Image (tube, rainbow, N blue to C red):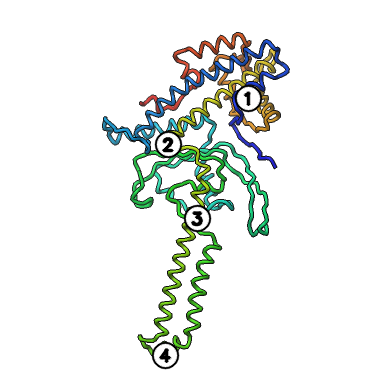
Amino acid sequence: MPARKDCSHFIPVLTPELVEVLCADRQLADEERAPLRELARLVHQGYHRALHRRLVELKNAYAPFDPDSDAVALLPVPAQERQHRLNGLLSDLTWLLNRADFRHLSREEIEPMLASATDWGIRMQVDFSAFEHCAIFVRGDSYQTRVLRSWRTWFRQAEVEVPIFRRLVLILKLRAGPKLGPGADADHVYLKLFKDIPRADVDMLLPGAKVRLKLIDRGKIGVGFLSGLGTVAWRKLDELLKFVHSFDPTSTGLWGLTAGALGYGYKSYYDYRSTQQAYHLNLTQSLYFQNLDSNAGVLTRLFDEAEEQETRTALLAYFFLWRYAGPEGFTAEELEAAMEVYLDRYAGVTLLCEPGDPAAKLLRLGLARREADRYRALPLPEALQAARAFRYAESAGEDLLGQAAQSRAGR
């Protein structure tokens, strides 16, 4: 069964391929294809320039909180100013993740996930008071087919559809204290980017989470201890009864029973620690191939994705407004419906446009005009002139990206 691609606002297609598919549309004349490719190039360059400016700003804002940085701070920052910078950084990270079409998971969404785990995951117990700041952003609510072999399938291989997040970003700032151990770093902000994380296994990604043994593992450890202790007691029953009737500290039965209890107690503790280590090893192996990037590297990757998403949305919106809206134009809702139907038909992608966003992008780029509640695209030659204008405009960054994070005004 092919994996479903329920990707919400995200457009999971390569920009060059999208351009070629649009240029191959039968409604286009041959002489229109080259100018459309040129328009795509100019729009992409405009977004690249605007977002690169913001990338430099955000990297500078993140530098004091980067746990991987080996730079030496030359200027001391007072605690109040550092907190102000931290607040601005967290606000800017939210702005960036929204641009890359991630959505924030609320506490109400996370808590039900903590009570379960998939057959490939591990049940964890999370103490959120150990974090000064903890935010999870996800993109791509989808399904992945995995192979399961367990007692429920009579140990035969069976394909199971698992609900996953295609991408997950974790923003963490730890709280100083004993809960995460003496090595916990409470001065920095940690950024983690993962792929294909089952929704029920989100708690596996949080540091300091304690492993919760499965009921069958608890039973194996407990039953082993009790059965061993019972066996020793049965074998020493006669001596134990004599000890009860006439107290004798030198009784071999007493010492044998004590030694047996201690031995089985140690064995149970050893089994518990071995099971716990096996869980942690399984956790490490599970996340090894799902970890995409960390800390400052996450910023670069997210800006690249934001650049691609902005470009794809703008190109799709212009194309349908230009070729299919007709002289009367489209409303914002009609434009979004046309984009959604097209991607569902030709790419098998379920796109849910953010209401009003595609039309707003075209207005900021200067590729469309608005009359009342309807939008009309500029003819392709005029659109190229507008694209060249914002490509070289000194204020292109603000024009293309609209209102950035409010924290920038305070820095």
Residue at image position (53%, 42%) is 290
Tell which of 370 and 23 is nearer to you: 23
Disc 4 or disc 3, which is closer to the eye? 3
Residue at image position (68%, 14%) is 328
Q: Residues within 10 Å of mark 4 (few under 14, many from 20)?
A: few
Q: Position of residue 363 (x, y in %)?
A: 56, 17
The CA distance from mark 4 to mark 1 is 89 Å
Residue at image position (50%, 68%) is 222
Residue at image position (62%, 31%) is 352
Which of disc 4 and disc 2 is earlier in sequence? 4
The CA distance from mark 3 to mark 1 is 43 Å
The CA distance from mark 3 to mark 2 is 26 Å
Pointer 4 residue: 245
Q: Position of residue 311 (x, y in %)?
A: 56, 22
Which of disc 1 and disc 2 is earlier in sequence? 1
Q: Secondary structure at mark 3?
A: helix
Which quadrant would the C terminus be assigned to in this image?
Answer: top left
Which of disc 1 and disc 4 is earlier in sequence? 1
Disc 2 or disc 4, which is closer to the eye? 2
Mark 3 touches mark 2? (CB < 8 Å): no
Amino acid bearing label 4:
His
The CA distance from mark 2 to mark 1 is 30 Å
Q: Residues within 10 Å of mark 3 (few under 14, many from 20)?
A: some
Pointer 1 residue: 17
Above or below residue 403? Residue 282 is: below
Pointer 3 residue: 279
Amino acid bearing label 2:
Asn
Pointer 2 residue: 295
